[in-house]
Image (spheres, rainbow, N blue to C red):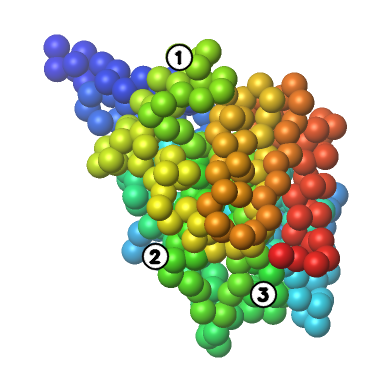
């Protein structure tokens, strides 16, 4: 009987790729595959793994474009992977494929952060790990040690944050922390939020017609952040944050997908950020007919290619805000 009780599912997020049993075991149904770092034969992009904090296991995968020149410093992207804070990693084949392509297209150095995941490490731990990774990156601009790729090839006046889904949530919240706390030696130019996982107590837009999806989104938030103040927590509903206008960059690109329930939160973010007194430039790119993180599942489709090109342009356009 004890064995049967242990096998009882107490938190069922099968649709999101995981479930939790009464004995505390977490079963991840997807996002568990990993691939080693490599040199991509098509793009020439090289990758390697680094340990940022041996005590916590915080680590990252770094990417550099083909034949970088130390005399021509490159923009840097700090990337936070998605997966509902619970699945996927910086070492998954999905993100290896995407970030290889982005590093090549944008001619940029990429640091893909592997933060600890919920539910074993509930929020705010993934936020704390992400901030520790950001500070580690920034330290390369002012100290003599550190990773040679960051020391030799990065222009620390051209730093960007990005992430998809829950990683988009992290990217926004890291940008807020930069605005509030600052980072010596590093300038955050822009943030790219791809299908960001935001919410709020009261439904908006398509959420009104998708009660199941809205309830699942709400359930996940309280599951990954049990000590949260609720569904209007500023970490989840950023437009209610009194510090919203403190966003620590001067331009933002929000990518949304027409069939994604989170689409309206992306548009709402843009509208409210423009009203907040922040003073930067925020744009939205909408993928017609597509759904949540479609670009990761079908990276060669026309809309995914267009989004990749738009993000690369965002990181390299002249007259940066």
Contact check, label 3 and label 2, Cβ < 8 Å: no
- The percent coordinates of residue 183 (x first, y second) are 50, 74
- Cβ–Cβ under 8 Å for marks 3 and 1: no
Residue highlighted by disc 2:
54
N-term mark: 3 or 1: 3
The local crowd at label 1, few if under 14, some if 14 to 19, many if 20 or more residues have their Cα within 10 Å, is few
Which one is nearer the viewer's eye here, 261 or 140?
261
The quadrant in which the N terminus is found is top left
99 horizontally vs 242: left or right: right
Residue at 57%, 48% in the rendered image: 275
- Which quarter of the rendering shows the C terminus? bottom right
What residue sits 85% from the left and 32% below the top? 302
Report the Cα–Cα distance between label 1 and label 2. 41 Å
Residue 45, above or below 166: below
The location of residue 175, given as percent across then percent down, is 52, 58
Estimate the spatial distance between the alpha carbons at disc 3 and disc 2, rounded to whole Å.
28 Å
Q: Position of residue 34 (x, y in %)?
A: 57, 42
How many circles with numbers are drawn on the protein? 3
User: In terms of secondary structure, where does tag 3 sit?
Assistant: strand
* Separation of residues labelled 3 and 1 (CA atoms): 44 Å
- Mark number displayed over residue 212: 1
What residue is disc 3 on? Answer: 157
Circle 2 SS class: loop
Can you give x and y, in whole percent of width and height, for residue 217 in the image? 44, 26
Q: Nearer the viewer, residue 26 or 141?
A: 141
Query: How many other residues sit within 10 Å of disc 3, few (<14), some (14-19) or many (≥20)?
Result: some
In the displayed structure, 140 sits above or below 11; it is below
Which residue sits furthest left?
1
Which numbered dot is residue 178? Answer: none
Q: Quadrant of residue 256?
A: top right
């Amino acid at each position: 009987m004890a064995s049967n009780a242990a096998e009882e599912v107490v938190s069922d997020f099968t649709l999101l790729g995981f479930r939790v049993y009464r004995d505390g075991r977490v079963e991840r149904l997807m996002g568990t595959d990993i691939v080693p770092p490599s040199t991509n034969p098509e793009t020439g992009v090289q990758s390697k793994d680094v340990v940022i904090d041996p005590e916590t296991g915080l680590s990252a995968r770094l990417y550099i474009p083909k034949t970088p020149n130390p005399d021509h410093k490159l923009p840097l992207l700090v990337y936070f992977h998605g997966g509902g804070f619970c699945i996927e990693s910086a070492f998954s084949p999905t993100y290896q494929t995407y970030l290889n392509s982005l590093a090549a297209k944008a001619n940029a150095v990429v640091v893909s952060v592997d933060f600890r995941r919920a539910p074993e490490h509930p929020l705010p731990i993934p936020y704390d790990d992400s901030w520790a990774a950001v500070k580690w990156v920034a330290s390369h601009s002012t100290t003599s040690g550190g990773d040679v790729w960051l020391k030799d090839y990065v222009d620390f006046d051209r730093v960007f944050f990005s992430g998809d889904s829950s990683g988009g949530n992290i990217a926004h919240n890291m940008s807020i922390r930069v605005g509030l706390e600052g980072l010596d030696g590093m300038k955050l130019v822009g943030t790219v939020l791809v299908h960001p996982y935001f919410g709020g107590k009261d439904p908006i837009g398509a959420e009104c017609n998708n009660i199941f999806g809205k309830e699942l989104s709400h359930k996940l938030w309280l599951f990954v952040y049990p000590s949260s103040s609720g569904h209007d927590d500023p970490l989840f509903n950023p437009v209610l944050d009194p510090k919203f206008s403190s966003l620590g960059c001067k331009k933002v690109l929000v990518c949304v997908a027409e069939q994604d329930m989170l689409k309206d939160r992306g548009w709402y973010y843009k509208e409210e950020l423009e009203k907040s007194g922040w003073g930067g430039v925020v744009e939205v790119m909408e993928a017609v007919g597509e759904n949540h993180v479609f670009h990761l599942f079908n990276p060669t489709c026309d809309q995914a290619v267009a989004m990749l090109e738009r993000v690369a342009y965002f990181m390299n356009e002249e007259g940066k805000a």
